[in-house]
Amino acid sequence: MKRLTRLFLPLLFISFIIPSCVVQQSPITGQKRAYAYSWDQEVQIGKDVDSEIVREFGLYDDEGVADYFNEISKVILENSHMRREETADQFRETVFTFRVLDSPVVNAFALPGGYVYVTRGLMAHMNNEAQLAVVIGHEIGHVAARHASQRGLQQTIGSVVVLGGAILGQELLGLPGETILNLSSQAAGLLFLSYSRNHERESDRLGVEYAAKTGYVAAEGAAFFTSLKRISERAGQSIPSLLSTHPDPGERERNIPRKAREWEENGYEQTILNTETYMEILDGMIYGENPRNGFREENTYFHPELAFHFPIPQNWIMINQPSQVVLLSPEQDAVMILRIDNESSNARESVQSFLSANNIETDDQRANQSGNLTAYEANFFIQDENQNLGVNIYALEYGSRVYRFINYTERNKFDSMKPRFAETTGGFRQLDDQRILNINPVRLSIRQLDRDTRFRDLLPQSLPMNIAPEEIAIVNQVYLDDTIPAGTFVKIPVQ
C-alpha cells in the first residue's frame, strides 16, 4: 500500500534522508568544514541521479551543440578551484560531465560530484559565449563549493521541497513540481534543492572569477540577468528579493560587472566574446516546445511522432515530458498520467500487472474500447493515514505499443470525475491529420544586419506557434522599438 501511495502523492513533500555529518576539505578555501556527504558520496550521488535527469528531460539531439558546450565548459573548469595545483587530488581528479538538455525552459543547474546542465532554452537567450561562460562558471562554483552537501545539513526529514535549486530557480518557476513525478526522491531532492542566497551569491562570484580567468568578458553575464528579470516580469512571477532564496536578478545584473572589474584590476584581461561562433551554434537550434514530441492545440493533445491524439478537459493544465504526459485539474484535485508500458504485451496484461505489483485486488475491471482500439480498465480505492483516493487504471493497445493512463482524485470526488477521465481515455485515437503529422519545430534563424533597423521591423507579420514579439525581443536582449546597428546578429524564429 505504501508503495502505491508514493506513486500517487502530489509531489509537494519529499523525505530527504540526511546522512551523518562528515568533516572534509573545501576545494574553495582548502580548510575543513562539515558536510552532509563525503566527496566520494557526492560523486556517486551525481552519477546515480544523472541517468534519471537524462531519462526525464532528454538530451538535445545535436552533436555539434553538445561538443561545443563540452569543450568550452572544460576550458572554464581548468580555471576553477577544481583544477588548481594547491587543490587536493580527490577534487582535481574528479571527472566532470557537461550536458545540454532538450528543454525550452530557461535554466541551468548542477549535481554534486561534477554534473553540470544547461537547457537549449537558456542557450537561446544568450547573445555570446561570454554570457554562457559566466553561467557555466556559476554551476561549476556550486559543485566546487559543495553547496548541495552544505545545504543537506540544514534539511530536515519530511521537509517541504522548495522550487529553486537551479540558477534561475524561483525566479521563473521554470521546473514545476510536477516534473519530478517520475524521479526518485533522491533525484527530486537534489533537483529542487533550495540553496541559500549566500550560496547563490558565492556561485555568482565564482562564475565571474572562472570566466574572467579564462579571458571572457565576464561583465557580459549581467545582460542575461537583465533578460531574466524581463522574463519574470512578463510572466508575472517576479519574486521580492527578501522572499526569494535567490538574489534578485536586478541585484545580480548590478554586481556582476563590479566583480568583473575587480578581476580586470587584478590583471586578468577579459577580451573574449566569440559572438559569431556562438551565433553559428544557435543557428537552426530548436526554439520553444518541440511539437514533434507532443503539443496542445486548444483542448486536444497531439503527438505527431507517435501519431495519436486525445481530448484534454476544459481548463486542465498539461505538462508534457519525454517519458509522460500529465494532466492536472484546475483545482489541482485530480490527475491523469499517460505513459508507455514497455513491459506488457496487451492492455489487459498492463492493468493486471499494475494491480499485482501493488498488491491490489478489485472486482471492478473490464474490457473496453477507445474507438476501434482495444482497451482494459480497473477502478479501486486506496486509503492510509494520509489520503483516501479513487483510482482508474486504463490501458489501450495502439500500433505496437501499450499506453497506460493512471487517473486519480479524492475518493469523494471520484464518481463526478470519472466522466472527465473517460472523455480523455476513450477519446484516444490514431492521428491522420497531415497538417499535424508533418509539423516541424520552430528553429532560430541567425541574421547579421546590413543596415540599422528597428527590431520590430525585423519580425515577420505572423510569428509561428503563437510566439509573442516581446518574447523574441527578450531572446535578443533588446526592446521592440530599439534601433539595431548594422553588423549585429539577430535571432528570428522560423518554422
Image (cartoon, rainbow, N blue to C red):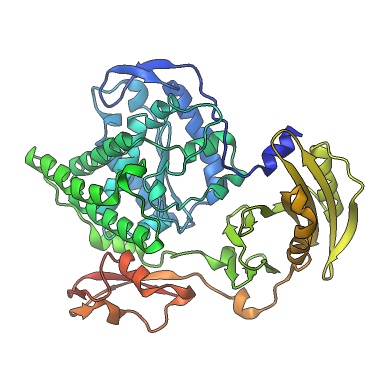
Q: Which residue is drawn at 19% across and 72% down?
A: 487
Near-viewer residue (290 or 90): 290
Asked whether residue 139 is in view, the answer is yes
Q: In which quarter of the image is residue 483?
A: bottom left
Quadrant (top left, top right, bottom left, bottom right) of the N terminus = top right
Residue 317 vs 389, above or below: the answer is below
Using residue 435 as the reference point, say whether residue 143 is left or right of it. left
Q: Residue at x 76, y 66 (%)?
A: 423
Using residue 359 as the reference point, say whether residue 420 is left or right of it. left
Using residue 62 as the reference point, say whether residue 408 is left or right of it. right
Q: Position of residue 8 (x, y in %)?
A: 69, 44
Near-viewer residue (206 or 487): 206
Q: Where is residue 200 in the image (x, y as percent from the top left)?
A: 32, 39
Near-viewer residue (186 or 100): 186
The residue sitting at the bottom extreme is 461
Residue 214 vs 302, above or below: the answer is above
Asked whether residue 217 is in view, the answer is no
Q: Position of residue 299 (x, y in %)?
A: 63, 71
